[in-house]
Every structure is written in C-alpha cells, then in structure tokens.
Image (spheres, grey):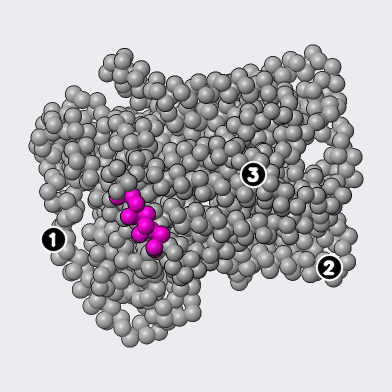
C-alpha cells in the first residue's frame, strides 16, 4: 500500500511532464535521429548519444531526456533492418534475428519479417515499461540477490543454447563454440593482465577483438560474398511475397511467445554485468524449445524473429534498473546516458540510489518516455518496411559495394585502427569457412560473446567461494547453491537435454550436401593447429596467474578433444557422411557463376588500397572499378552510384564527427578531411 | 583551506602572466575553428564524462567561441592514444589531449607500451579527486582509528587490477598490515560497490563523487563503516584531511596510529607518489609539444575563466568533486608532481606487484 501511495502520484507527475507538445516533439526528433543512426550497422546508441551530448548542457531536463531516450530506444528497433534485409547484425541485440530474418528476406518475405519483428519489438517495449513501473520500486533486493554464482549460471544458461544451435553434428557445434570462446580470450586477461595469443608488439591484439567485428565477420561477410558470387537479388527471383500486414498478424498469432520473451528480456536486462549479450540467444533458444514443428528454424521461421525481437527492446527497459537504481550502467550507451543526465538543467539530477527517493517522477518519465519512443519508432519503422524491403529485389551486385563500404566503416568505428579492417577480413574468412563446412556460426558467436563473462564470473565466483569455504563449509555451500542457482541449474540441464534431442532438426546453415574428404579435413586440421597453438600459449603463462590460463586451458582442451574425435571420425567414415558437409560440393554456392577467391579479392583490394591511400580514396577506386568491371554498369550509372556512396559516407561521418581509416599516403602528406 | 589558498595563488599568478601576455593574445582568434579534445578512452568512461563536462564551458570562454568536440581514441589502456599524441606537433592550436591516472600509471611503472613522455607536453589544466575506503559493519566495529584490530581478518575486495588506480588502496591496506585479497577483473568501481552491497566483497573504496552518490548512504544506514580517506595535498605537498570529508581521518592518520605502519621510508614515498598521480592530479589537459606561448596563454585564460565562472563550483562538485582545478603554472606544477616518482619508489612498487600479484610489466 505504501508503495502504491508513493508511486501513483509520481506516475501522474511523470505523465504530466511527458505529455507536453514540446516534449513529444523532442522525443520524435530523437527517434528520427536514432533511426538514422541505427540503420547503420555498428554505430548504435553510443555514436548517437555522443552526437547529442554537446546540446545537453543546461538543457531543460525533461526535454533532454526525451531527446536522448528517443534516440537510444529505437536503435535496437532500427538495426533490425540491417539484420533482416542484409544479414548484417547491426548490434549484439539483433544477432539472433539474423538466423531466421535473413532467410525470410531471401524468400522474398522481408516486409513480413520486418513488420513481425517491429510489432514484437513494440510489444516487448511496452511490456517492459509496464513491468518496470511496479518492479522498479521493489527491484533493489532482487538485483542484489544476483551475485557472482547466479551470474555465472545465467551465462552458462546462455552458453547452453549452443546445444540447440549446434547443427547436425553435435561435436562440430561444440567445437565451433569452443573456438569462439578461445577467440574471445585473445588479448590481455581481465584478472592478471597476462597476454593470450597476443604480444605488446601488436597493441591491437592486447585489447582483444571487438564484438562488432566478429559479428560482421561471422554473419555478414560470408553472406555478402555468397550472394555476390551468385549474382542475383537477395530475394530469389526478385519478387516480394507477403506484405507488412502479414507480419503483424504473425506476431499476433504468437502473442504469448512474444509475452514470455519480453519477460525474459526484462528479467535478464535488470541484472547488471550481463547486459544484452545473452538475452536474445536465451529468447531464441526458448522459442525453439516451445515450437512444435522445429523444421523451419534457420530457414525462415517467423517465430525465430518474433522471440528475440520481443526480448531485445524489453531488455532496454530492464537495463534501466541497474542504471537508475545503482548508478551502474548496463551498457555503453547507458554509461553515456548517466553522464549526460548530470549535464541537464542545473545538474542536480543524480543517477543512483537516491533517484527513487528524490526523483521518482523523473524515473517514471524515463521509463514511459522509453515506452513512448518505442511506439513512435516502431510505427515509423513499420511504415517504412514495405518500401525498404524493395532493396532485396535489387540485383545484389549493385548493393555489394555499398555493403562492403558500410561494414568496413562499422568495423573501423570499434577501434579506429587500420587493423580493424584486417581483423574483419580474417574473421570474415573464418566465417566463410564455418559456413561452407556447416560448422554452426551461431554457436561460434555465442562462444565468443560469452567468453569474457564465463571467464570473469567463474574466476571471481571461485575466488569468493573458496574464501567462504575457508570460513566454514556451510557458508561456502550456501553461497554456491543459492535457490536462484539451483533453479537456473535445473533450467540449464533441461534445456541442454531438450536441445540435444532437437538440434538435429535445426539446420542453421540449411541442408548442406557432403562432398569430398579433403577440404573439410584440411579445415579441421587448421582449427586443430590453432587450438594447439593457443593451448601451448596459455600453458606458458606462469602458474601464479592461474586465473588467466585456467579457462583457456579447459575450454581449449574440450574443443581440441571434440576436434580430435572428429578427426578420427573423418578418417573412418565414408565421404558421404554428414561430417563432410561442404557447400562447395553442391547447391547454390557450388553452382555460382563466380569463384570464392575472385569475389573475396574485391573486398581484399578495398582493404589493401586503404592501407596505401586511405579509406575514401580507396573507396572511390573500389566503387568505380567494381561497378564498371564486375557489375558491368554504364559509366553514367557507375559515376552516379559512386558519388552517392561517397556522399553518404561523408555526410554520416561528418555528422558524427568520425574519421576514416588513414593509409600510408596520409602519413606522408597532409590532406583535408575527408581524405585525411 | 590551504588548498583553496594554493588554488587562488596559482590563479593570481596565471592571471598576472596572462595580463603580461595580453598584447600577444589579441592575435589568437579561434572563431570558426573546431577544437578537437582527444581522450584516449572510450565514450563510456570517467574521462569522457570529465571532458564532456568541460568542453562546452571551454568553448564559451575561448576567443571566437570555437566548437569544442570530444573525440575518443581508446585502446591498450589509453597508451595507444597517448603514443599518438606524442607524435602530434603544434599546428593551429586546435588540438587538446586529456589524460587520466590510467595514463599516468603505466608511464610511472615503465609499461612496455609507453612511448610517450609527459614532460614534452604543455599542461593547461589539471583536476583531481579524492577517495574513501570503507568496511563491512561487522569488521567495522573493530576499527578504532587504527588498523591494529583488523590485522587478523581476511578481507575480500573487488578490484579492476593491481596496476590500475586500485594500486593506491591495495598498497595502503598492505602497509597497514591488513590481509586484503583482491578479486580482479571487475569493470568499474560501481561493480565493486555492488559486490560490497551483495556481501561478496567485505571492503571497498570509491572516489569522492561516487562515495557521495551511493556509498555515503550505506554508511549512514549502518551497512558500512567509513575507514579512511586518502586525504588531499596542501600547498607544501603535505597530506591533510580531504575538504570534502573533513570528518573522516586520512590514511596518513590511520597509518600513524597503527603498529608497524610508517609514514616515511620507501613504502610511504611510493604510496604517496602513486596517490598523487591517481587522485589529486588525476586528470590533465595538454596541448601538444611546441605550442607557442600565446596559444597556451589563451587556453590558460579560458580555463581560468571557466573555473571562476558563477555556479561552476556547484556544478563541478558533482562532476569532479570539490577539488581545486589547477590552470597554467599550477597545472604545470601538479603535472610534474603527478608524473614523477623516485627510482626507489618505482622499484618498490614494481617489486611488490611482482611479489604479491605476479604482475610483471614486460
């Protein structure tokens, strides 16, 4: 009763604050800006918020909040465009969406997939807001109940989704996840600072690889290259099937799934330290497990879009809890948001524990501005989806240079090093081969995303548990086996058992034919060589930094064991076995008119040219020659498209105040922006 | 109070210097220009917050009110950005660089990635913060102004890493003879506080603004007991009580009261050197090497105007704490103090890191 007595008036005040024409105007402005930023893969809310920061100083608090929230709220909505239409995961929030969204686009059902995704996003956002309105008042003890063992268990639950996504050969999926985990450990260890597969001579590697680059490399590069080789449009026969209305109906038919995934989103979102990295995978796993006919997953199952999209907007709401209640940002954009709030007005709104007591009305304004921004953003997105879906009917060869441009720019934003482009290329190559030989790419990505949390939480939980055990055995057991841990443990076990039983029917890479023995075997040997090198490298870390080597050793050991068993299987089994799956053996890749290496060479040439003359000049040369030679366009068309691409890039980078990758030329001569 | 005196003396000196340079100043006009303030960290860190706070204020005070944009160049624990800045030469005075304790510590510890030299750069403005350590209530009862009764207790502490700012509290607790086991790998001090609130960590520290924002409530409600502040520097370089927390004893006082803890000698010198680099002189804004005096004076004057503007103190209290903002000669002196450490002190810390945490910077 007490709670309601304080909450209701504050809620009323909040609505009075929000429902002013000027506030709503700012909100819409923020939403539109957010949509523009969000459709660019890899930029996301951080870039958008940084753009707004200079204007926040001394601004009327509620106006500033409307602008910022409008921008942040729609990014997980608008990045769906890139995931569904191009197979490019715009951010970690939309990785699972790619799995079924992009196949739908290939079937010519892009508009349906988009509008189903947007409806689900909207619903998720509203469920999140409603839930938070009550929950934020009682959330504090619940958030504090999630200690390190609990977080470790949630991470493991996320990792257990590998079981669902492992593909036809479970060992392969497990090895792919293990490889992802190992790639995730590259760089300076969090705990003791030891270097894994890195050296101080290459400072780039000490920071590890960025998620954006791995996401783009694993999902986007292989798809772009494959489509480019086939020289067709994304939607087969360049025809669009079901329209946006069908998507909304699809969502409505699955409203309970949407509801459950929204709640998963809010609940995982409120736990600080996990952020969004696991939410969409847990939601995807849940969707698969609750679907009767699993045969369509990975090939364009609409539920596979609705589940993750319901959770990722709800998660944004959940993420407000640690941000507002504890002053601990749940994500990068929330960190900037906290900083920006302190600039607003006279600077007296302080995010943190006092927020609920002193500024409950502001707190509620934030929650409901977020919900409102979702509504506005979704309606705009649905309205646009029919038109934008037409992109999938364009001959892909005309889209490809723009996509190479976008993903290179996106990759460069993560570290602003030339090495970012190299890393994108190398990871892209790994992605191409994982795809070719039917190693589960989602499993690899889940491994990569969860690598750091797994290592961090297991080390920290172990250390604190042993500290408790030294005090007394009971205290130690109580710490490790809290009720929450036990529940999560049961959920994980059930999900793994169910997952393994179901995995065979879910083919994330479609039905891949088997070919000769040689190519798959060579790839396996390369992976084994890397794992052995990484294991030796980890073993060389001195023992007093055990925390830095234990996870690479254990994970690498398991992955290596899987690979060795597969090696034996490969030797024993005939070459028609599924273990020798090879996309080059039969199917659309094998029949493609263009070869892999010549196609990849185009992308490589862009990177090499960037190394010498910098990004923009390289891009001019790349687009001209690609459109003229590869696409066979007329000079007029070539020049117009090139000019359009360069202008788009410059306007975007100029507005966000970003630089382009410089080359050797820029090191020798001073050139004006954007050439510098 | 001595701190304010120091600040005002420095201010007066800076103004006098600015006055003398006045004729030359008229030459520097930045209207229509864009100043890039480069931060070697990501958009989400404390240094970003610091630069974003100062950027609009600085813009308003520079001649011609140029646009000041904050740019981020994260990587390799800020050494990437600092190495980049080392290669920059003065061009037209539109480049500003901001460093933090995380840039100073690798420099002081001879990190192999460091290829920059602080003394080459031209410091314009420096600001700092303080910090407060606190205990869980149970062990807090045994704290009597000395750590004598805390020596037999095992503490656990969520830490970002022994070579980070956490070096200062870890070394302080070690000097007090306390047994503090760090759990490494947390991402920020906020995570450390959360660990403390969950009861997983039993000792914690926060920088001043974070302490005021969240931990002070824990102390007030009996869920934590304040132990000591790191203190602040007076104009002679002595450690005195932190003006933000006049009621909390300093580490120096606690150390003096604790058996076996010395406020002289190499351990103390080492602690003090790293304390200065990490707290009172935590963040510094630089112009590149070779910047002419008129440009330098323009910036010094602008920052001086920023800090003496109406309402700055109140706003700054939240962003950077109630600590002096040094400009001009004051910033130069502060930078020198924050970036020099005696060979003995350095050797002591490097040896300790190797012994206790197995950290070797090679």
Q: Is residue A426 above or below residue B294?
A: above
User: Is residue A533 at least partly visible in the picture?
Assistant: no
Q: Residue at the spot x=80%, y=69% of the render?
A: A639
Q: Is residue B75 left or right of residue A600?
A: left
Residue, disc 3: A252
Image position of A275 with respect to A567: above or below? below
Q: Is B311 on the left or on the right of A301, as rendered?
A: left
Q: Nearer the viewer, residue A484 or A543?
A: A484
Q: Residue at x 47, y 70 (%)?
A: A21
Q: Which residues are magenta?
A: A6-17
Q: Position of residue A359 (x, y in %)?
A: 31, 55
Asked whether residue B276 is drawn in magenta, I would say no
Instruction: Name the image quarter holding residue A627.
Output: bottom right
User: Dot 2: few (<14), some (14–19), or many (≥20) neighbours within 10 Å?
Assistant: some
Residue A559 can be seen in this image: yes
The dot on residue A350 is none
Give the Cα separation between the discs numbered 3 and 1. 69 Å
Which of the marked residues, 2 or 3, is nearer the chain's N terminus?
A: 3
> Is A9 a magenta residue?
yes
Disc 2 is placed on an element classified as helix
User: To which residue does mark 2 refer?
Assistant: A637
- Identify the chain of the residue marked 2, using the numbered disc in the image: A
């Amino acid at each position: 009763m007490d709670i309601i007595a304080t909450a209701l008036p504050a809620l009323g005040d909040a609505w009075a604050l929000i429902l002013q024409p000027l506030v709503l105007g700012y909100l819409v402005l923020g939403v539109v800006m957010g949509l523009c930023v969000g459709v660019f893969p890899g930029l996301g809310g951080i870039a958008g918020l940084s753009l707004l920061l200079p204007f926040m100083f001394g601004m009327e608090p509620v106006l500033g909040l409307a602008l910022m929230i409008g921008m942040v709220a729609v990014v997980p909505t608008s990045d769906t465009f890139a995931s569904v239409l191009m197979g490019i995961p715009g951010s970690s929030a939309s990785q699972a969406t790619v799995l079924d969204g992009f196949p739908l686009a290939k079937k010519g059902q892009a508009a349906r997939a988009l509008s189903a995704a947007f409806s689900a996003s909207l619903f998720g956002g509203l469920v999140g807001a409603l839930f938070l309105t009550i929950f934020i008042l009682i959330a504090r003890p619940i958030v504090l109940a999630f200690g390190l063992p609990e977080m470790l268990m949630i991470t493991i639950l996320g990792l257990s989704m590998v079981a669902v996504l492992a593909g036809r050969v479970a060992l392969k999926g497990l090895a792919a996840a293990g490889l992802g985990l190992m790639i995730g450990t590259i760089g300076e260890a969090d705990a003791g600072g030891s270097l894994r597969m890195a050296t101080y001579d290459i400072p780039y590697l000490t920071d590890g690889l960025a998620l954006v680059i791995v996401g783009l490399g694993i999902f986007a590069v292989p798809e772009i290259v494959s489509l480019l080789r086939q020289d067709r449009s994304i939607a087969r026969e360049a025809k669009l099937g079901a329209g946006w209305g069908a998507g909304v109906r699809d969502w409505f038919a699955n409203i309970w799934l949407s509801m459950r995934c929204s709640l998963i989103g809010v609940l995982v979102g409120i736990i600080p330290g996990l952020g969004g990295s696991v939410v969409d995978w847990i939601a995807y796993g849940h969707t698969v497990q609750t679907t009767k006919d699993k045969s369509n997953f990975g090939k364009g199952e609409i539920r596979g879009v609705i589940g993750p999209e319901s959770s990722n907007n709800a998660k944004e709401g959940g993420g407000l809890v640690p941000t507002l209640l504890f002053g601990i940002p749940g994500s990068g954009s929330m960190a900037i948001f906290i900083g920006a709030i302190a600039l607003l007005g006279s600077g007296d709104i302080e995010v943190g524990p006092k927020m609920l007591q002193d500024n409950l009305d502001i707190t509620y304004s934030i929650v409901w501005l977020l919900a409102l921004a979702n509504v506005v953003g979704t309606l705009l997105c649905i309205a646009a989806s029919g038109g934008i879906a037409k992109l999938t009917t364009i001959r892909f060869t005309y889209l490809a240079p723009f996509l190479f441009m976008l993903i290179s720019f996106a990759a460069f934003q993560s570290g602003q090093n030339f090495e970012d482009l190299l890393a994108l290329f190398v990871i892209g190559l790994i992605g191409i081969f994982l795809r070719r030989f039917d190693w589960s790419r989602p499993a690899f990505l889940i491994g990569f995303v969860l690598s750091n949390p797994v290592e961090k939480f297991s080390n920290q939980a172990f250390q604190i548990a042993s500290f408790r055990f030294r005090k007394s055995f009971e205290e130690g057991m109580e710490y490790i086996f809290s009720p929450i841990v036990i529940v999560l443990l049961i959920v994980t076990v059930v999900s793994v058992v169910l997952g393994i039983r179901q995995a065979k029917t879910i083919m994330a890479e479609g039905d891949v034919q088997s070919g000769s023995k040689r190519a798959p075997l060579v790839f396996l040997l390369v992976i084994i060589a890397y794992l052995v090198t990484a294991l030796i490298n980890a073993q060389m870390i001195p023992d007093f930094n055990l925390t830095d080597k234990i996870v690479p050793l254990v994970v690498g050991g398991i992955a290596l064991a899987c690979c060795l068993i597969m090696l034996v299987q490969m030797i024993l089994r005939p070459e028609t076995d599924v273990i020798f799956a090879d996309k080059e053996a039969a199917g659309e890749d094998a029949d493609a008119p263009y070869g892999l290496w010549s196609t990849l060479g185009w992308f490589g040439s862009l990177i090499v040219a960037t190394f010498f003359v910098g990004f923009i000049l390289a891009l001019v040369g790349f687009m001209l020659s690609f459109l003229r030679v590869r696409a066979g366009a007329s000079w007029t068309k070539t020049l117009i498209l090139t000019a359009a691409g360069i202008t788009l890039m410059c306007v975007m980078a100029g507005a966000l105040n970003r630089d382009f990758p410089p080359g050797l030329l820029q090191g020798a001569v001073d050139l004006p922006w954007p050439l510098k | 109070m001595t701190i304010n005196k120091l600040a005002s003396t420095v201010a007066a000196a800076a103004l006098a210097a600015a006055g003398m340079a006045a004729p030359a100043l008229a030459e520097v006009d930045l209207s229509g220009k864009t100043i890039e303030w480069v931060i070697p960290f990501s958009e989400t860190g404390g240094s970003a917050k610091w630069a974003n706070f100062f950027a609009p204020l600085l813009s308003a005070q520079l001649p011609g009110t140029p646009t000041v944009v904050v740019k981020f160049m994260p990587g390799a624990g800020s050494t990437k950005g600092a190495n980049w800045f080392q290669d920059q030469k003065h061009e037209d005075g539109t480049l500003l660089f901001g460093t933090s304790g995380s840039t100073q510590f690798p420099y002081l510890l001879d990190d192999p990635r460091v290829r920059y030299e602080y003394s080459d750069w031209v410091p314009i403005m420096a600001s700092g913060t303080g910090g407060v350590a606190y205990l869980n209530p149970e062990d807090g009862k045994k704290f009597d102004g000395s750590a004598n009764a805390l020596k037999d207790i095992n503490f656990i502490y969520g830490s970002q890493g022994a070579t980070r700012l956490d070096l200062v509290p870890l070394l302080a607790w070690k000097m007090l003879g306390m047994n503090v086991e760090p759990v490494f790998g947390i991402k920020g001090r906020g995570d450390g506080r959360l660990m403390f609130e969950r009861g997983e960590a039993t000792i914690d520290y926060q920088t001043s603004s974070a302490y005021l924002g969240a931990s002070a409530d824990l102390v007030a409600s009996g869920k934590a007991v304040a132990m000591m502040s790191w203190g602040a520097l007076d104009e002679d370089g002595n450690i005195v009580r932190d003006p933000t927390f006049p009621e909390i004893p300093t580490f120096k006082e606690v150390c003096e009261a604790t058996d076996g803890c010395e406020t002289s000698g190499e351990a103390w010198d080492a602690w003090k050197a790293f304390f200065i680099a990490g707290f009172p002189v935590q963040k510094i804004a630089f112009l590149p090497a070779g910047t002419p005096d008129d440009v330098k004076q323009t910036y010094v004057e602008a920052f001086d105007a920023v800090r003496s503007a109406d309402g700055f103190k109140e706003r700054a209290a939240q962003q950077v704490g109630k600590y002096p903002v040094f400009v001009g000669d004051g910033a130069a002196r502060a930078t020198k103090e924050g970036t020099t450490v005696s060979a003995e002190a350095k050797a002591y810390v490097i040896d300790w890191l190797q012994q206790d945490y197995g950290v070797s910077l090679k």
